[in-house]
Every structure is written in C-alpha cells, then in structure tokens.
C-alpha cells in the first residue's frame, strides 16, 4: 500500500509523530493508501524550511524562477497519464476528464505564471515637475496555500504557481481527501531540482495542519479555496493577525435560459455545467432558471439527456458521472435530496444512490438528479449542495429572474443564455457575481480576475490579481531637486 509522505525542505519525510489516515478510493469504497496525519510539529518544520529558503529564492532573477516553474510544467506534461490515473483514483472523477482537463490545467498553471512573472510590472506616478512615485512589488515571505478536493492538482497548482513565481516560499496543504497528486507533485519538484524549502507540502486534517498554518505568525498570507464555513473560520484567525487573505468559497450559481437563446447550445452546455465532475465544481450552475415559453420543452429535453448519462466506473471512457468524493459527501448530497422532497420538490430523474455493477459495486455513486416545483427561496435553492443535483425554476421577466438569481448569500458565477446582447449586458451589470458567462460556461482565460462576491469569497485569483496578491506594494516618492 502506498504511503504518502510530506515534502519538507526538499525531502520526502514521514510525519514526525508517525500518525497516518486512510486514503479511500471512492469508486471502490476501499482504502488504497495511507496519508500522513501531520500536526503543528510538521507545520513548524515546513515553515522554518520555507523561511530559510526565502532569501535566496526571492533574490533569484525572474528568468531563473521562470526556468524552474517551466521545468515543473514539462515534467507534469511528461507524466500526464500517471497523474490523471492518480487523480481519477483519488477523487472518483472520470479518467478521461482528469486527462483532458485537470492535469493539463495543472501544467498550464505553472507555465502561465512562469511566463507572467517575466511580464509583470508595477506602476509609476509622476507629479508634474515635482516628484516621481514608483511602486515596488516585493514577495511577501512564507505564504500558506490551502486547497479543496474537487479539482485537486488543478486548484493546488493555481495557488502555488503564482506564489512561487512572485518569489515567495510556500507551505501548502492539499485536502486530506485527495492528497495523491500533491504527493506526486512533490516528486516532480525534486526531479525538477527546485531548491529545498521553496515549496513544502504538509498532509493532514484541516483542523490540524490547515489551522496551524493559518495561525503561524511566520506565515504572512493565506490563499484558501474551500467551503464558506471554513473560510469564515480562517478569516477569524487570520484577520486579527493582519495577514493577507484570499478566500475562494462556495457557490450556488444561476444558469439563466431565455426564450431567445441558442437552444441546442444552451441545452448541451447546461447538462455539462450541471453535472461535470459529479456537480462538484464551485462554478456549476445548480439553479436553472428557464423562461416560461420554453420551460416545458427545455425540461423534457434536458431530463432526456440527463437520463442518458452513464453513471459508473471512472476508468471507462463512456462514463459521464463518476463517484462522489467520499461516503460522507455522498450521504450529505442524499440528505439534501431528501430535504428537497420534503420541501415539495418533484424529482424528475435521479434522486438516489446508484449501485454500479462489477468492481465499483461499493462505490459512492449518485444518479444525476433534476428537481422542479421548488420556490427560489427554499433551502434547496439557497444552500450549496456541491453534488449532481440541479433544480429547474420557470420565470417570466428579466426583473423576476434577477431577483431569483441574487436572492442567495453566494455570488460566485452566473451563466446567461440569450442572443440579445442588450439583455445580456443589462443582466450581467446587475447580477451579483464575480464571473458572468454569456452563451458559454467555464470558458477560462487565465489572465481574467477569478473569484466571488458575498459569501463566495474575498479577493481575486488569476493573472495580475494573483501576482499582486502574492506581492506587497511599497510606494517610493522621489522629489525632484532643483
Ligand atoms: P473545506 O472547506 O472543507 O476544505 C478546504 C480545505 O481547507 C481542505 O484542505 C481542508 O482540509 C482545509 N481545512 C478544513 N478546515 C480547516 C481549518 N479549520 N483551517 C484551515 N484549513 C482547513 O472544503 P472542501 O474540501 O469540502 O471543498 C468544497 C468546497 O470548496 C465547496 O464549498 C466549493 O464550493 C468550494 N470551492 C470553491 C472554489 C472557488 O474557486 N470559489 C473552487 C472549488 C471549490 P481537509 O480536507 O483535511 O479537511
């Protein structure tokens, strides 16, 4: 059985106290590896290694840091099949999805920020004939990166790459539910010759490793992606210590379909935006609002397509819905479906656990579920489920659907389907979300600001925003002498 190790000061090491957790294959429902259950002692070692590495890493030329990060990207590309297989096994997602999306994006993250740092610039502000201000942007020091289980390597590297590119040293904690590709990344960093201590990866539980990292006085910034409740907890510890904080939290995103949409595209993409990665993407459009004239037709066509999606073994190319990430998460999703029924929801398809034939018979599978007949303000439509569950809600006017879209605490993303550009821009101006997709979903340009408003988080990732987050600005004002 594989025993995952921490990556501290350039070495793969066992947790100091020798404690381990089980790592479960969610498609089989059985333990397949051991993961360190690290604690404050391991975090301390990682932080001190990062601190020691910081002076030389931060002083390296951007060109040199570019070379290291690009080398890591190259090795990820060379190992795409191995990494994708590990991601699919650890998370339950279809292998084809990990191969097509997760792992290529992880190498793009490194490549993107490797090159971005070569082009990053800071401002200068001249005060006519009197003075010139210029802004320095220095790396912060040791920073903490904490990531969730839904897109394990994809989101882990999305934080680590800009932090390293900007000259920081990192202590990172992947989700204990999906640690495997982070472990493989530590092997890749060793192969790439990354200097010891520049990146440290400590595995273990959120309450132990994550919280110790957030509390640590030498960790000057925290970049976190995960649930809103965890984000609140982290903010309550980090804010009084005046740490820089980037919080990417939950979503309950509206998918708004107007009568005048490109019908086939809206239908096809809505199936994907509802159930991709088993609905476990913070950007999934879990509330589908359909304008009255096309409601019945869209509903029938949508349900027909969803019923055709194959739920099953993540290794099979024809599988569209793999396993949920854990038994606990599957039970949480099933509880939400039960609540929806109690609230008067009509389950049009799915609604239950699926027992898959063969090797996956004990895995954590839930049928893609479509529910109608619920008010926009009921619990099901207000709380994030983060699973393969969507609701359908009819609407008549723009004003009505805007009210529905904005009535939740979350504000991460929104999708709008219409061929009327005026309507699309009117809607996007008024929707409370950090990201609006018009006639598309999850079309990502890594230069754009990524993040949410309201309970979906604070700050933006991506492009210059990420490099600005991971650097501290200092203004220097020089008076012109006569
Ligand atoms: P969690 O908030 O449970 O966990 C996220 C990470 O934080 C994990 O590594 C977790 O460790 C760690 N953690 C847990 N408790 C603490 C703590 N007290 N202090 C520090 N770290 C802690 O989220 P999930 O992993 O369940 O991920 C799902 C959530 O992530 C959903 O709400 C989803 O919407 C959100 N998400 C947001 C995205 C965005 O960009 N806005 C993108 C993807 C997901 P451990 O796993 O060991 O508990």
Image: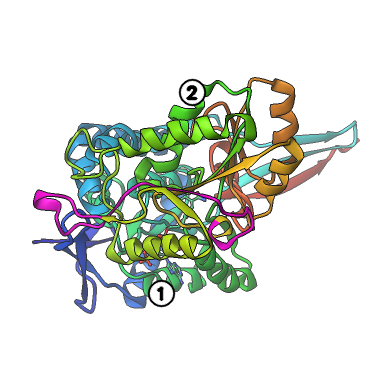
Q: Looking at the image, is mark 2 or mark 1 earlier in the sequence?
A: 1
**In the figure, 466 relative to 171: above or below?**
above
The residue sitting at 17% across, 50% down in the picture is 356
Is 462 left or right of 52, judged from the image as shown? right
Pick the front one: 14 or 224: 224
- Residue 95 visible? The answer is yes
The residue sitting at 74% across, 40% down in the picture is 430
Question: Quick check: is 433 in the magenta stretch?
Answer: no
Q: Which residue is mark 1?
A: 207
- Cα gap from disc 2 to disc 1, whole angstroms: 43 Å
Is 146 left or right of 307, judged from the image as shown? right
Label 1 CB less than 8 angstroms from ligand 1: yes
Q: How is the image coloured?
A: rainbow
Is 171 left or right of 353, judged from the image as shown? right
Q: Which residue is mark 2?
A: 265
**In the figure, 319 relative to 385: above or below?**
above
The residue sitting at 73% across, 43% down in the picture is 400
The residue sitting at 43% across, 44% down in the picture is 158
Pick the front one: 293 or 25: 293
The picture quadrant for ligand 1 comes to: bottom left
Is 45 left or right of 80, judged from the image as shown? right
> Dot 2: within a 10 Å radius of its alpha carbon, few (fewer than 14), some, or many (20 or more) residues?
few
**In the figure, 130 relative to 259: above or below?**
below
Question: Which image quarter is the N terminus in?
Answer: bottom left
Question: Quick check: is 369 in the magenta stretch?
Answer: yes
Q: Position of residue 213 (x, y in %)?
A: 44, 69
Q: Does dot 2 land on a helix, a strand or a loop?
A: helix
Marks 2 and 1: which is nearer the front? Answer: 2
Q: Position of residue 47 (x, y in %)?
A: 40, 66
The magenta segment: 354-380
């Amino acid at each position: 059985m594989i025993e995952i190790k921490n990556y501290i000061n350039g070495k793969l090491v066992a947790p100091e106290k020798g404690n381990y957790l089980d790592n479960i294959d969610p498609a089989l429902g059985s333990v397949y590896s051991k993961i360190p259950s690290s604690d404050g002692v391991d975090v301390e070692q990682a932080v001190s290694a990062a601190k020691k590495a910081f002076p030389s890493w931060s002083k390296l030329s951007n060109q040199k840091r570019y070379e290291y990060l690009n080398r890591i990207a190259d090795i990820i590309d060379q190992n795409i099949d191995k990494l994708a297989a590990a991601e699919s096994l650890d998370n339950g997602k279809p292998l084809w999805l990990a191969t097509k999306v997760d792992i290529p994006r992880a190498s793009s993250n490194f490549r993107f920020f490797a090159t971005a740092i070569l082009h990053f610039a800071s401002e200068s502000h001249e005060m006519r004939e009197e003075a010139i201000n210029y802004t320095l942007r220095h790396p912060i020091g040791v920073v903490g990166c904490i990531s969730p289980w839904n897109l394990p390597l994809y989101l882990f590297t999305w934080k680590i790459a800009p932090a390293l590119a900007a000259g920081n040293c990192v202590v990172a904690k992947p989700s204990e539910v999906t640690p495997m590709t982070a472990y493989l990344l530590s092997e890749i960093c060793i192969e790439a010759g990354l200097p010891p201590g520049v990146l440290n990866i400590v595995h273990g539980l959120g309450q132990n490793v994550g919280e110790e990292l957030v509390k640590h006085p030498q960790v000057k910034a925290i970049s976190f992606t995960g649930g809103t409740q965890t984000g609140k907890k982290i903010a309550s510890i980090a804010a009084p210590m005046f740490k820089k904080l980037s919080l990417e939290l939950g979503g309950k995103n509206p998918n708004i379909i107007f009568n005048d949409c490109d019908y086939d595209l809206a239908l096809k993409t809505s199936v994907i935006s509802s159930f991709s990665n088993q609905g476990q993407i913070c950007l999934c459009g879990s509330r589908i609002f359909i304008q009255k004239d096309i409601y019945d037709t869209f509903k029938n066509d949508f349900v027909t397509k969803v019923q055709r999606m194959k739920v099953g073994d993540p290794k099979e190319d024809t599988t569209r819905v793999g396993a949920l990430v854990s038994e606990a998460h599957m039970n949480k999703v099933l509880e939400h479906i039960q609540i929806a029924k109690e609230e008067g929801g009509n389950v049009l398809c799915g609604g239950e656990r699926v027992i898959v034939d063969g090797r996956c018979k004990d895995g954590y599978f839930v049928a893609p579920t479509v529910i109608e007949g619920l008010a926009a303000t009921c619990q099901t439509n207000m709380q994030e489920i983060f699973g393969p569950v969507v609701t359908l809600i009819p609407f008549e006017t723009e004003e009505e659907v805007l009210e529905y879209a904005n009535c939740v605490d979350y504000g991460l993303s929104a999708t709008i389907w219409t061929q009327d550009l005026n309507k699309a821009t009117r809607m996007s101006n008024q929707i409370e979300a950090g990201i609006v997709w018009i006639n598309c979903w999850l079309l990502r340009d890594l230069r754009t600001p990524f993040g949410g408003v309201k309970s979906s988080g604070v700050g933006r990732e991506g492009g210059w925003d990420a490099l600005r987050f991971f650097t501290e600005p200092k203004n220097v004002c020089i008076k012109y002498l006569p």
